[in-house]
């Protein structure tokens, strides 16, 4: 039987070069640790190293919500790894507002840039290398909380829906070249960003929409490792016949039809 202890010995990603955005804390740090355990070489990025990246990972400071930041990350990838076989766009998030109509224009732009366009830009820079080599795996981190529509988070939900639609289209374009593109959609997960968002949301004293305090059906909130396991599976050869899919990892809270 495969156990948590011996699973890391599989080293199924040995020889793979991976980029993970937002890997200094939360879900991204869990993904970095999981990919390192599986033998991958990992480069991660965040705006600062105030929380250090997991030991063993290379780090470049960059703001991936700008084109210049995406270019800096792609340059670091070429310099440190010589290209990527695995790309995980995880950096994301947003603050809630009392009303969808109250979300300022610059917040819409920021939220789209971070959650959606960063993936578009990084893929434009790095996926051609995968396509030319005839192999690669891309995972975009979305959210399970897309339904019901939540006015305080319209900008966030719209950005993640765009990310998912884009992922499915990119999967179709890259499948003939052996490059797979999938989405992982976490439910509420114990991370610094997740906790801060939920605290702020609770302080808005809103009613209706997604209930901010209920416990997921499986009886606990998620851990970064829960999401990291799904990402590690999807970028591994065990998922070699899976592309264009969205895998919800949410303790059963947001079943999709
Ligand atoms: N936690 C949850 O409950 C939950 C639920 C559903 C979906 N998700 C999704 O899961 C992903 C990770 O969430 P999390 O809760 O782990 O977040 P988190 O705890 O806030 O960590 C975010 C990571 O991304 C980095 N980051 C943020 N903005 C960045 C930028 N502009 N450029 C580069 N790096 C940036 C942060 O470092 P710096 O701040 O130093 O840049 C940090 O390393 C997000 O896409 C989020 O939407 C989370």
Image (cartoon, rainbow, N blue to C red):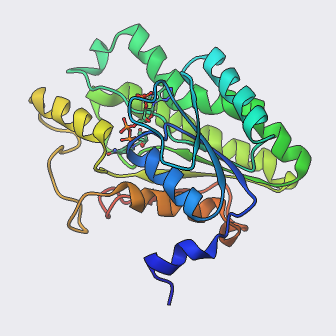
Residue 137 lies, with reference to residue 161, above or below; the image says below
Counting from the top left corner in percent of width and height, residue 14 is at: 71, 64
Q: In the image as oriented, which residue stretches furthest toward the right?
A: 132
Q: Who's the residue at 73% across and 56% down the image?
A: 16
Asked if residue 257 can be seen in this view, the reply is: no
Residue 85 lies, with reference to residue 128, above or below; the image says below
Can you tell which quarter of the image residue 208 is in?
Answer: top left
Is 186 in front, or is 37? 37
Is 255 in front, or is 72? 72
Q: Who's the residue at 68% across and 27% down the image?
A: 121
Counting from the top left corner in percent of width and height, residue 256 is at: 42, 58
Counting from the top left corner in percent of width and height, residue 52 is at: 43, 37
For the C terminus, give its image quadrant: bottom left
Is 210 in front, or is 8? 8
Q: Who's the residue at 24% across and 21% down the image?
A: 97
Residue 226 lies, with reference to residue 134, above or below; the image says below
Counting from the top left corner in percent of width and height, residue 197 is at: 25, 33
Q: Who's the residue at 52% across and 59% down the image?
A: 34
Can you tell which quarter of the image residue 108 is in?
Answer: top left
Q: In the image as oriented, which residue stretches furthest toward the bottom?
A: 1
Q: In the image as oriented, which residue stretches furthest toward the top?
A: 105
Q: Is residue 216 left or right of residue 164?
A: left
Is 82 in front, or is 202? 82
- Circle count: 0
Give the quadrant of ligand 1: top left
Q: Is residue 190 left or right of residue 159?
A: left
Asked if residue 82 can be seen in this view, the reply is: yes
Q: Is residue 252 left or right of residue 14?
A: left
């Amino acid at each position: 039987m495969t156990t948590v202890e011996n699973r890391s010995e599989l080293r199924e990603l040995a020889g793979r070069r991976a980029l993970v955005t937002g890997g200094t804390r939360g879900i991204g740090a869990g993904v970095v640790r999981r990919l390192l355990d599986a033998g991958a070489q990992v480069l991660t990025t965040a705006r600062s190293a105030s929380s250090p990246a997991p030991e063993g990972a290379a780090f470049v400071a960059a703001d991936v919500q700008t084109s210049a930041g995406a270019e800096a990350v792609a340059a670091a990838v070429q310099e440190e790894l010589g290209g990527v076989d695995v790309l995980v766009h995880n950096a994301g998030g947003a603050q809630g507002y009392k009303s969808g109509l109250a979300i300022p224009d610059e917040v819409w732009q920021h939220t789209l840039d971070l959650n959606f366009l960063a993936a578009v830009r990084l893929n434009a820079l790095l996926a051609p290398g995968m396509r030319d080599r005839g192999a690669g795996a891309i995972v975009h981190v979305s959210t399970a909380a897309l339904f019901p529509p939540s006015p305080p988070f319209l900008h966030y939900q719209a950005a993640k829906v765009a990310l998912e639609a884009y992922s499915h289209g990119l999967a179709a374009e890259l499948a003939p070249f052996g490059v797979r593109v999938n989405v992982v959609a976490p439910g509420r997960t114990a991370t610094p960003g997740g906790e801060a968002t939920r605290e702020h949301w609770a302080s808005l004293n809103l009613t209706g929409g997604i209930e901010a305090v209920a416990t997921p059906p499986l009886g606990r909130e998620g851990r970064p490792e829960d999401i990291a396991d799904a990402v590690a599976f999807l970028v591994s050869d065990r998922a070699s016949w899976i592309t264009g899919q969205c895998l919800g990892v949410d303790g059963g809270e947001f079943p999709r039809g």
